[in-house]
Amino acid sequence: MVKKYGLLFLLLWFTLWVSGCWSKKEIENLAIVSAIGVDFVEIDGKPKWEVTMEIYHPKALAPTGGDGISRGGSGQKLISWIVTSVGDTVDEAINHISARTPRVLFFAHTRVVIVGKEAVENYNLEEVLSLFFSSHEARLRNWVLIADGTAKEVLLTGPEMEPTRAGELEELIQQTRKRLSKAEVLNFRDVGEAMALPGKDVITGRVEVFKTPEPPTAIYLPGQESVRHTMRLSGGAVFSKGDFAGWFSDLETRGYLFLVGKARMTIVPIHLANDDTFDGNVRIIKASSRIIPEIAGSDLKMKVMIQAEGHLEGFFPGDFAVTSGFFDEVGRKTALELKKDILAALNKAKEYRADIFGFGEQVYRRYPKYWQLVKEQWRDYFASLPVEVEVKVTIRRTGIFEEPVPSR
Protein backbone atom coordinates (compact mmCIF):
# COMPACT_ATOMS: atom_id res chain seq x y z
CA MET A 1 0.00 0.00 0.00
CA VAL A 2 2.83 2.39 0.90
CA LYS A 3 4.54 1.63 -2.42
CA LYS A 4 1.32 2.41 -4.32
CA TYR A 5 0.94 5.79 -2.61
CA GLY A 6 4.62 6.52 -3.23
CA LEU A 7 4.24 5.70 -6.93
CA LEU A 8 1.12 7.85 -7.18
CA PHE A 9 2.98 10.76 -5.57
CA LEU A 10 5.85 10.45 -8.06
CA LEU A 11 3.44 10.39 -11.00
CA LEU A 12 1.71 13.54 -9.76
CA TRP A 13 5.06 15.24 -9.18
CA PHE A 14 6.26 14.46 -12.71
CA THR A 15 2.94 15.74 -14.10
CA LEU A 16 3.75 19.21 -12.78
CA TRP A 17 6.84 19.32 -14.98
CA VAL A 18 5.41 17.93 -18.21
CA SER A 19 2.01 19.62 -18.35
CA GLY A 20 3.33 22.73 -20.10
CA CYS A 21 1.54 26.08 -20.20
CA TRP A 22 -2.04 26.04 -21.42
CA SER A 23 -1.99 29.69 -22.46
CA LYS A 24 1.45 29.82 -24.08
CA LYS A 25 1.96 31.78 -27.29
CA GLU A 26 4.76 30.81 -29.62
CA ILE A 27 6.80 33.90 -30.42
CA GLU A 28 7.16 32.84 -34.06
CA ASN A 29 3.40 33.18 -34.47
CA LEU A 30 3.11 36.67 -32.98
CA ALA A 31 2.97 40.09 -34.63
CA ILE A 32 4.27 42.27 -31.80
CA VAL A 33 2.63 45.71 -31.76
CA SER A 34 5.10 48.32 -30.50
CA ALA A 35 3.06 51.50 -31.07
CA ILE A 36 -0.59 52.33 -31.74
CA GLY A 37 -2.08 55.50 -33.21
CA VAL A 38 -5.78 56.37 -32.95
CA ASP A 39 -7.39 59.04 -35.17
CA PHE A 40 -10.93 60.27 -35.72
CA VAL A 41 -11.65 60.78 -39.44
CA GLU A 42 -14.58 61.37 -41.77
CA ILE A 43 -14.97 59.25 -44.89
CA ASP A 44 -17.77 60.17 -47.29
CA GLY A 45 -19.25 62.32 -44.53
CA LYS A 46 -19.38 59.43 -42.06
CA PRO A 47 -17.37 59.42 -38.81
CA LYS A 48 -14.80 56.64 -38.60
CA TRP A 49 -11.92 55.54 -36.42
CA GLU A 50 -8.53 55.08 -38.04
CA VAL A 51 -5.97 52.91 -36.26
CA THR A 52 -2.30 52.86 -37.26
CA MET A 53 0.16 50.35 -35.81
CA GLU A 54 3.86 49.78 -35.85
CA ILE A 55 4.37 46.02 -35.88
CA TYR A 56 7.60 44.08 -35.87
CA HIS A 57 8.40 40.43 -36.17
CA PRO A 58 10.75 38.78 -33.65
CA LYS A 59 12.88 37.25 -36.43
CA ALA A 60 13.69 40.74 -37.66
CA LEU A 61 15.09 41.86 -34.31
CA ALA A 62 18.66 40.95 -35.16
CA PRO A 63 21.48 43.55 -34.94
CA THR A 64 20.61 46.38 -37.28
CA GLY A 65 22.18 49.25 -39.07
CA GLY A 66 21.14 52.83 -38.54
CA ASP A 67 18.53 52.55 -41.28
CA GLY A 68 16.34 50.18 -39.25
CA ILE A 69 17.10 47.19 -41.50
CA SER A 70 17.98 43.84 -39.98
CA ARG A 71 21.24 42.30 -41.27
CA GLY A 72 20.66 38.92 -39.62
CA GLY A 73 19.34 35.85 -41.39
CA SER A 74 19.05 35.65 -45.15
CA GLY A 75 18.80 38.97 -46.92
CA GLN A 76 17.55 42.23 -45.43
CA LYS A 77 14.31 42.64 -43.59
CA LEU A 78 12.69 45.79 -42.25
CA ILE A 79 12.17 45.63 -38.50
CA SER A 80 8.87 47.48 -38.44
CA TRP A 81 5.76 47.47 -40.57
CA ILE A 82 3.38 50.43 -40.49
CA VAL A 83 -0.21 49.39 -41.19
CA THR A 84 -3.45 51.39 -41.09
CA SER A 85 -7.11 50.41 -41.12
CA VAL A 86 -10.47 52.10 -40.62
CA GLY A 87 -13.60 50.98 -38.77
CA ASP A 88 -16.76 52.22 -37.10
CA THR A 89 -15.05 51.59 -33.76
CA VAL A 90 -11.44 51.32 -32.65
CA ASP A 91 -11.91 47.61 -32.00
CA GLU A 92 -13.29 47.03 -35.51
CA ALA A 93 -10.34 48.86 -37.08
CA ILE A 94 -7.96 46.64 -35.09
CA ASN A 95 -9.82 43.54 -36.29
CA HIS A 96 -9.40 44.71 -39.89
CA ILE A 97 -5.64 44.88 -39.31
CA SER A 98 -5.78 41.33 -37.93
CA ALA A 99 -7.19 40.22 -41.27
CA ARG A 100 -4.06 41.53 -43.02
CA THR A 101 -1.47 39.63 -41.03
CA PRO A 102 -0.98 35.85 -40.82
CA ARG A 103 0.24 36.24 -37.25
CA VAL A 104 -1.63 37.04 -34.05
CA LEU A 105 -1.52 40.69 -32.97
CA PHE A 106 0.20 40.86 -29.59
CA PHE A 107 -0.17 44.02 -27.49
CA ALA A 108 1.65 43.07 -24.28
CA HIS A 109 4.84 44.76 -25.52
CA THR A 110 3.22 47.95 -26.80
CA ARG A 111 5.19 50.97 -25.60
CA VAL A 112 3.31 54.01 -26.85
CA VAL A 113 -0.30 54.93 -27.65
CA ILE A 114 -0.75 58.12 -29.69
CA VAL A 115 -4.12 59.84 -30.00
CA GLY A 116 -4.73 62.36 -32.78
CA LYS A 117 -5.94 65.90 -32.15
CA GLU A 118 -9.28 65.36 -33.93
CA ALA A 119 -10.04 62.37 -31.70
CA VAL A 120 -9.60 64.26 -28.41
CA GLU A 121 -11.43 67.29 -29.79
CA ASN A 122 -14.49 65.18 -30.58
CA TYR A 123 -14.43 62.63 -27.76
CA ASN A 124 -13.60 62.52 -24.07
CA LEU A 125 -10.15 61.08 -23.37
CA GLU A 126 -11.65 58.33 -21.23
CA GLU A 127 -13.88 57.26 -24.15
CA VAL A 128 -10.92 57.13 -26.53
CA LEU A 129 -8.78 55.06 -24.16
CA SER A 130 -11.58 52.85 -22.81
CA LEU A 131 -10.66 49.92 -25.08
CA PHE A 132 -7.09 49.92 -23.82
CA PHE A 133 -8.13 50.22 -20.18
CA SER A 134 -10.32 47.13 -20.54
CA SER A 135 -7.89 45.02 -22.59
CA HIS A 136 -6.20 42.14 -20.76
CA GLU A 137 -3.06 42.65 -22.87
CA ALA A 138 -2.71 46.39 -22.23
CA ARG A 139 -0.01 47.43 -19.79
CA LEU A 140 -0.27 50.28 -17.29
CA ARG A 141 3.23 51.40 -18.28
CA ASN A 142 2.19 52.30 -21.86
CA TRP A 143 2.91 55.96 -22.58
CA VAL A 144 0.05 58.20 -23.77
CA LEU A 145 0.84 60.98 -26.26
CA ILE A 146 -1.44 63.46 -28.03
CA ALA A 147 -0.50 64.32 -31.61
CA ASP A 148 -0.69 67.92 -32.77
CA GLY A 149 -2.07 66.61 -36.05
CA THR A 150 -2.72 62.93 -36.68
CA ALA A 151 -1.26 59.91 -34.96
CA LYS A 152 -0.86 58.30 -38.38
CA GLU A 153 1.43 61.13 -39.49
CA VAL A 154 3.64 60.60 -36.44
CA LEU A 155 3.99 56.85 -37.01
CA LEU A 156 4.72 57.33 -40.72
CA THR A 157 7.68 59.54 -39.78
CA GLY A 158 10.86 57.52 -39.71
CA PRO A 159 13.04 57.42 -36.58
CA GLU A 160 16.40 59.18 -36.55
CA MET A 161 18.43 57.35 -33.88
CA GLU A 162 16.52 54.20 -32.96
CA PRO A 163 15.49 51.29 -35.23
CA THR A 164 11.75 51.66 -34.46
CA ARG A 165 9.33 54.55 -33.97
CA ALA A 166 8.26 53.20 -30.58
CA GLY A 167 11.88 53.01 -29.45
CA GLU A 168 12.56 56.54 -30.66
CA LEU A 169 9.50 57.94 -28.88
CA GLU A 170 10.24 56.10 -25.65
CA GLU A 171 13.80 57.43 -25.57
CA LEU A 172 12.55 60.94 -26.34
CA ILE A 173 10.12 60.66 -23.43
CA GLN A 174 12.76 59.41 -21.00
CA GLN A 175 15.50 61.83 -22.00
CA THR A 176 13.31 64.93 -22.43
CA ARG A 177 11.84 64.47 -18.96
CA LYS A 178 15.26 63.83 -17.43
CA ARG A 179 17.41 66.48 -19.12
CA LEU A 180 15.05 69.30 -20.10
CA SER A 181 11.99 69.25 -17.81
CA LYS A 182 9.88 70.56 -20.70
CA ALA A 183 7.56 67.60 -21.25
CA GLU A 184 5.19 65.66 -19.02
CA VAL A 185 4.13 62.31 -20.42
CA LEU A 186 1.77 60.07 -18.49
CA ASN A 187 1.29 56.34 -18.79
CA PHE A 188 -2.05 54.52 -18.53
CA ARG A 189 -1.73 54.20 -14.77
CA ASP A 190 -1.10 57.95 -14.32
CA VAL A 191 -4.01 58.86 -16.61
CA GLY A 192 -6.36 56.49 -14.79
CA GLU A 193 -5.34 57.85 -11.38
CA ALA A 194 -5.77 61.47 -12.48
CA MET A 195 -9.25 60.72 -13.82
CA ALA A 196 -10.23 58.89 -10.64
CA LEU A 197 -8.91 61.42 -8.12
CA PRO A 198 -11.23 64.23 -7.01
CA GLY A 199 -10.13 67.65 -8.20
CA LYS A 200 -7.42 66.46 -10.60
CA ASP A 201 -7.13 66.87 -14.36
CA VAL A 202 -4.82 65.36 -16.96
CA ILE A 203 -1.82 66.79 -18.76
CA THR A 204 0.25 64.54 -20.99
CA GLY A 205 2.80 64.96 -23.74
CA ARG A 206 2.28 66.58 -27.13
CA VAL A 207 4.11 65.05 -30.08
CA GLU A 208 4.44 66.84 -33.39
CA VAL A 209 5.98 66.29 -36.80
CA PHE A 210 8.17 69.10 -38.10
CA LYS A 211 10.57 69.91 -40.91
CA THR A 212 14.16 69.58 -39.81
CA PRO A 213 16.62 72.42 -40.48
CA GLU A 214 19.19 69.91 -41.76
CA PRO A 215 19.25 69.12 -45.49
CA PRO A 216 18.02 65.68 -46.52
CA THR A 217 20.71 63.02 -46.64
CA ALA A 218 19.12 60.97 -49.42
CA ILE A 219 18.95 61.71 -53.13
CA TYR A 220 15.40 62.48 -54.27
CA LEU A 221 14.01 62.02 -57.75
CA PRO A 222 12.07 64.84 -59.46
CA GLY A 223 8.58 65.09 -58.00
CA GLN A 224 9.54 63.46 -54.72
CA GLU A 225 9.60 65.36 -51.44
CA SER A 226 13.04 66.77 -50.66
CA VAL A 227 12.18 67.96 -47.14
CA ARG A 228 13.15 65.88 -44.13
CA HIS A 229 10.58 65.40 -41.38
CA THR A 230 10.94 63.99 -37.91
CA MET A 231 9.05 63.95 -34.61
CA ARG A 232 9.64 65.68 -31.29
CA LEU A 233 7.96 66.25 -27.95
CA SER A 234 6.74 69.81 -27.51
CA GLY A 235 4.89 70.91 -24.37
CA GLY A 236 1.73 69.18 -23.26
CA ALA A 237 -1.95 68.53 -23.97
CA VAL A 238 -4.31 69.69 -21.19
CA PHE A 239 -7.70 68.16 -20.38
CA SER A 240 -10.54 69.36 -18.16
CA LYS A 241 -12.79 66.54 -16.91
CA GLY A 242 -11.35 64.45 -19.75
CA ASP A 243 -12.27 67.00 -22.44
CA PHE A 244 -9.44 68.50 -24.46
CA ALA A 245 -8.84 72.08 -23.29
CA GLY A 246 -5.74 73.14 -25.22
CA TRP A 247 -1.96 73.06 -25.42
CA PHE A 248 0.85 74.03 -23.07
CA SER A 249 4.09 75.42 -24.52
CA ASP A 250 7.50 74.08 -23.50
CA LEU A 251 8.01 76.82 -20.90
CA GLU A 252 4.47 76.51 -19.54
CA THR A 253 5.04 72.78 -19.15
CA ARG A 254 8.30 73.50 -17.34
CA GLY A 255 6.44 75.86 -15.01
CA TYR A 256 3.90 73.12 -14.30
CA LEU A 257 6.66 70.60 -13.52
CA PHE A 258 8.33 72.96 -11.05
CA LEU A 259 5.03 73.72 -9.35
CA VAL A 260 4.14 70.06 -8.78
CA GLY A 261 7.69 69.03 -7.85
CA LYS A 262 8.41 66.88 -10.91
CA ALA A 263 11.13 69.06 -12.48
CA ARG A 264 14.53 67.45 -12.77
CA MET A 265 17.27 69.08 -14.83
CA THR A 266 16.87 72.13 -17.04
CA ILE A 267 18.81 75.14 -18.32
CA VAL A 268 17.65 78.67 -17.40
CA PRO A 269 19.30 81.50 -19.39
CA ILE A 270 19.64 84.64 -17.24
CA HIS A 271 20.68 88.25 -17.71
CA LEU A 272 21.47 90.84 -15.04
CA ALA A 273 19.57 94.03 -15.89
CA ASN A 274 22.29 96.34 -14.49
CA ASP A 275 25.10 94.79 -16.53
CA ASP A 276 24.53 94.49 -20.26
CA THR A 277 27.68 92.39 -20.70
CA PHE A 278 26.42 89.57 -18.49
CA ASP A 279 25.14 86.38 -20.03
CA GLY A 280 24.93 83.06 -18.28
CA ASN A 281 23.09 79.80 -17.87
CA VAL A 282 21.97 78.18 -14.66
CA ARG A 283 21.65 74.40 -14.82
CA ILE A 284 19.01 73.32 -12.33
CA ILE A 285 20.01 69.96 -10.84
CA LYS A 286 17.43 69.50 -8.10
CA ALA A 287 14.01 70.94 -7.24
CA SER A 288 11.17 70.33 -4.81
CA SER A 289 7.83 71.95 -4.03
CA ARG A 290 5.16 72.07 -1.34
CA ILE A 291 1.51 72.84 -2.07
CA ILE A 292 -0.42 74.02 0.98
CA PRO A 293 -4.14 74.92 0.96
CA GLU A 294 -5.12 77.61 3.46
CA ILE A 295 -8.61 78.68 4.56
CA ALA A 296 -9.31 82.03 6.21
CA GLY A 297 -13.00 82.26 7.11
CA SER A 298 -14.73 81.01 3.98
CA ASP A 299 -11.92 82.02 1.61
CA LEU A 300 -9.53 79.45 0.16
CA LYS A 301 -6.07 80.16 -1.20
CA MET A 302 -3.12 78.00 -2.22
CA LYS A 303 0.46 78.55 -1.17
CA VAL A 304 3.25 77.01 -3.24
CA MET A 305 6.86 76.97 -2.03
CA ILE A 306 9.54 75.86 -4.50
CA GLN A 307 13.21 75.31 -3.77
CA ALA A 308 15.81 74.56 -6.42
CA GLU A 309 19.56 74.11 -6.64
CA GLY A 310 21.71 74.79 -9.66
CA HIS A 311 25.15 75.37 -11.15
CA LEU A 312 26.21 78.51 -12.99
CA GLU A 313 27.56 77.60 -16.42
CA GLY A 314 28.91 79.50 -19.41
CA PHE A 315 28.93 82.89 -17.70
CA PHE A 316 30.70 86.22 -18.26
CA PRO A 317 30.32 88.38 -15.14
CA GLY A 318 31.59 91.68 -16.53
CA ASP A 319 32.35 94.05 -13.66
CA PHE A 320 30.90 91.72 -11.00
CA ALA A 321 33.19 90.06 -8.49
CA VAL A 322 32.44 86.39 -8.04
CA THR A 323 31.42 86.51 -4.38
CA SER A 324 28.63 85.04 -2.29
CA GLY A 325 26.63 88.20 -3.02
CA PHE A 326 27.07 87.60 -6.75
CA PHE A 327 25.72 84.04 -6.38
CA ASP A 328 22.76 85.34 -4.38
CA GLU A 329 21.93 87.76 -7.20
CA VAL A 330 22.19 85.02 -9.82
CA GLY A 331 19.91 82.81 -7.71
CA ARG A 332 17.38 85.62 -7.39
CA LYS A 333 17.33 86.24 -11.15
CA THR A 334 16.97 82.53 -11.84
CA ALA A 335 14.06 82.34 -9.40
CA LEU A 336 12.35 85.22 -11.21
CA GLU A 337 12.69 83.43 -14.56
CA LEU A 338 11.25 80.22 -13.15
CA LYS A 339 8.43 82.11 -11.49
CA LYS A 340 7.46 83.57 -14.88
CA ASP A 341 7.05 80.05 -16.25
CA ILE A 342 5.09 78.92 -13.19
CA LEU A 343 2.68 81.86 -13.33
CA ALA A 344 2.24 81.35 -17.08
CA ALA A 345 1.28 77.73 -16.43
CA LEU A 346 -1.11 78.76 -13.65
CA ASN A 347 -2.84 81.40 -15.76
CA LYS A 348 -3.20 79.10 -18.77
CA ALA A 349 -4.60 76.28 -16.62
CA LYS A 350 -7.11 78.67 -15.03
CA GLU A 351 -8.14 79.80 -18.50
CA TYR A 352 -8.68 76.15 -19.43
CA ARG A 353 -10.43 75.43 -16.09
CA ALA A 354 -8.13 72.44 -15.76
CA ASP A 355 -6.72 71.65 -12.32
CA ILE A 356 -3.68 69.75 -13.52
CA PHE A 357 -1.80 70.73 -10.34
CA GLY A 358 -4.02 68.69 -8.05
CA PHE A 359 -5.09 71.66 -5.91
CA GLY A 360 -8.52 70.09 -5.49
CA GLU A 361 -6.92 66.85 -4.32
CA GLN A 362 -4.94 68.78 -1.67
CA VAL A 363 -8.11 70.51 -0.45
CA TYR A 364 -9.93 67.17 -0.35
CA ARG A 365 -7.20 65.64 1.81
CA ARG A 366 -6.69 68.58 4.20
CA TYR A 367 -10.18 70.08 4.40
CA PRO A 368 -12.65 67.28 3.51
CA LYS A 369 -15.68 69.18 4.83
CA TYR A 370 -14.83 72.27 2.80
CA TRP A 371 -14.29 70.06 -0.25
CA GLN A 372 -17.84 68.74 0.01
CA LEU A 373 -19.09 72.33 -0.35
CA VAL A 374 -17.07 73.19 -3.46
CA LYS A 375 -16.48 69.91 -5.30
CA GLU A 376 -19.42 70.26 -7.73
CA GLN A 377 -18.21 73.69 -8.90
CA TRP A 378 -14.54 73.13 -8.21
CA ARG A 379 -13.28 74.18 -11.64
CA ASP A 380 -15.16 77.47 -11.32
CA TYR A 381 -13.46 78.01 -7.96
CA PHE A 382 -10.13 77.02 -9.47
CA ALA A 383 -10.42 79.60 -12.26
CA SER A 384 -10.36 82.44 -9.69
CA LEU A 385 -8.34 80.75 -6.93
CA PRO A 386 -5.64 82.96 -5.35
CA VAL A 387 -2.25 81.24 -5.55
CA GLU A 388 0.83 82.55 -3.76
CA VAL A 389 4.09 81.34 -5.31
CA GLU A 390 7.51 81.53 -3.65
CA VAL A 391 10.62 80.40 -5.54
CA LYS A 392 14.12 80.17 -4.09
CA VAL A 393 17.15 79.09 -6.11
CA THR A 394 20.52 78.33 -4.54
CA ILE A 395 23.65 78.39 -6.73
CA ARG A 396 26.04 75.69 -5.54
CA ARG A 397 29.03 76.09 -7.86
CA THR A 398 30.25 77.53 -11.16
CA GLY A 399 31.96 74.59 -12.81
CA ILE A 400 35.71 74.57 -13.47
CA PHE A 401 36.53 78.30 -13.23
CA GLU A 402 35.23 81.00 -10.90
CA GLU A 403 36.59 83.77 -13.16
CA PRO A 404 36.21 84.13 -16.93
CA VAL A 405 39.28 83.41 -19.06
CA PRO A 406 40.89 86.82 -19.79
CA SER A 407 41.43 87.81 -23.41
CA ARG A 408 44.89 88.86 -24.57
Image (cartoon, grey):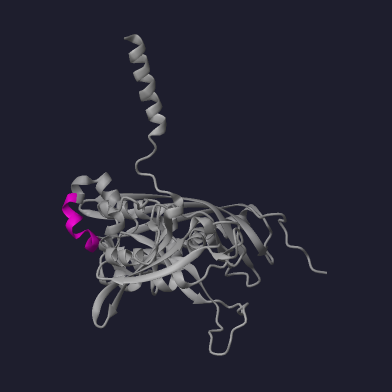
Front in this rendered view, residue 335 or 142: 142
Q: Please identify the quarter of the rendering in which residue 317 is found.
A: bottom right
- Magenta segment: 372-381
Q: Looking at the picture, does residue 396 appear above or below residue 68?
A: above
- Image location (x, y in percent) of residue 188: 35, 54
- Image location (x, y in percent) of residue 336: 49, 62
Q: Please identify the quarter of the rendering in which residue 208 is found.
A: bottom left
- Report if residue 268 is visible in the image: yes
- Per the image, is 328 magenta? no
- Image location (x, y in percent) of residue 219: 62, 82
- Lateral position of residue 168 relative to residue 91, left or right: right
Of all residues, the one furthest to the top in this rendering is 1
Of all residues, the one furthest to the bottom in this rendering is 222
Is the N terminus in the top left, top right, bottom left or bottom right quadrant?
A: top left
Magenta: predominant secondary structure element?
helix
Q: What residue sits 28% from the left and 58% below the top?
A: 131
- Image location (x, y in percent) of residue 404: 73, 62
- Lateral position of residue 369 relative to residue 143, left or right: left
- Lateral position of residue 258 relative to residue 333, left or right: left
Q: Please identify the quarter of the rendering in which residue 24 is found.
A: top left
Q: What residue sits 55% from the left and 65% below the top?
A: 77
- Lateral position of residue 75 relative to residue 97, left or right: right
Q: Looking at the picture, does residue 180 appear above or below residue 213?
A: above
Q: What residue sits 27% from the left and 62% below the top?
A: 242
Front in this rendered view, residue 322 or 266: 266
Front in this rendered view, residue 342 or 35: 35
Is the C terminus in the top left, top right, bottom left or bottom right quadrant?
A: bottom right
Front in this rendered view, residue 235 or 342: 235
- Per the image, is 378 magenta? yes
- Report if residue 294 is visible in the image: no
